[in-house]
Amino acid sequence: MTDEAADVAPHPEPRLTPNVHGALWMLASAVAFTVMMTLIKFLGEDYPAALQTFYRQLAGFVILVPVIARHRRAAFATTRPGILLFRASAGTVGLIFSFYAFQKLPLADANALSFTRTLWLVPLAAFVVREKVGPLRVFAAAVGFLGVLVMLRPSPEGLALGLPALAMLASSFLFALTVTGMKVMTRDHSPMVLLVWAATLGLVFSLPGAFLTWRWPTPLDLGLLAAMGVIGTATQWCYIKGMQIGDAAAMAPIDYTRLVFAALAGFLLFQETPTVWTIAGAAVVVASTLFITWREHRTARMR
């Protein structure tokens, strides 16, 4: 090849590094989550949280139907159905509480409180999974809960954010329980089996709440409810892909872009402006959860 030809020959485009590739999946997850939250809030006046949870679970189950049809009995193979029942019930109730909070709270406040799941994992890891939890992680979790108090602003008259804030905290605790249960189950169960059981039982457990609050949706609302469910499943998929491809410690901070997207969506669509207390408390919660994530990752690499 001549020098002139070499000069004009196309250079191969550099491939994305795993962390950049994973970061794009995490950003897609954050955007999808924000769209789902917006739909939850928009539909909240006409469709209660329990009914929205049913549509969310139905969408997850429908997406997994081909997997169930392909693997049949193997998709449900388990030796510990009790833990699976507990995970599904906790996850379903957690979704109802979470949807209720997103309907009633400003999106930025609800999103910030949802990150307390990482804080709840610290005591659960110590008491349920029997992991060794060092003093730094305990201190970081305690500081994170102080950030929660800043957002809640308790007083003799009650909490500034009220019952919906408590619902989101309860939801985060229940989701932390499901994560803890997943750590136990992944020792001898495949992710496919856990997903199939969670989707199937989640749909079953959401039926009573749907019956009690049922109303027939209009064609437009049915489309929005179906979209909400599908986007919720897509959010989980993008998050898992991001964590699989990129380094966990590098991916965790990107998940907090949800706070920015939530604040923008709340301001542009619902005229919500985050308070100074929300921003300050959220900053403390984010800092503490980032430290816990980094500490867990560092400990795992040392092992």
Image (cartoon, grey):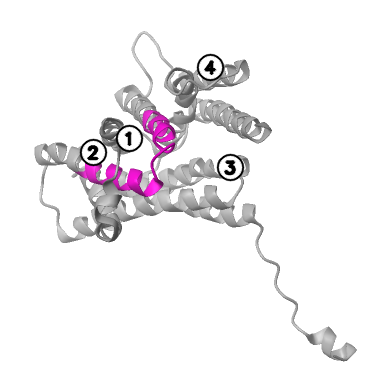
Q: Quadrant of the C terminus?
A: top right
Horizontally, residue 119 falls left or right of residue 196, namely right
Query: Amino acid under label 2?
Result: Ala
Q: What secondary structure is found at the residue carrying circle 4? A: helix
In front here: 15 or 278?
A: 15
Task: Please identify the residue farthest to the top as the structure is shown.
Answer: 156
Q: Quadrant of the N terminus?
A: bottom right
Magenta residue check for 192 = yes
Instruction: Decide which of 252, 41 is in the foreground and name it.
Output: 252
> How far separated are the C-alphas under marks 3 and 1?
25 Å
Numbered tag placed on residue 142 in the rendering? 4
Residue positioned 60% across, 18% down in the render: 134
* Residue 281, visible in the rendered structure: yes
Is 132 left or right of 159, judged from the image as shown? Answer: right
Please give the label number shown on residue 77.
none
Residue, disc 1: 98
Q: Residue at x 83, y 90 (%)?
A: 5
In the rendered structure, find residue 49 and report the number of the disc placed on it: 2
Q: Nearer the viewer, mark 4 or mark 2?
A: 4
State if disc 4 and disc 1 touch (CB < 8 Å): no
Identify the residue position indicated by label 3 in the image.
Answer: 248
Mark 4 and mark 2 lie on one chain; the one further toward the N terminus is 2
Say above or below: 186 vs 299: below
**Nearest to N terminus: mark 1 or mark 4:** 1
Q: Amino acid at mark 3?
A: Ala
Write down the quadrant of residue 298 in the picture: top right
Q: Which residues are magenta?
A: 176-203
- Ranked by sequence position, the earlier of labels 2 and 3 is 2
- Which tag, 3 or 4, sits closer to the chain's start? 4
Residue 162: x and y, percent? 33, 22
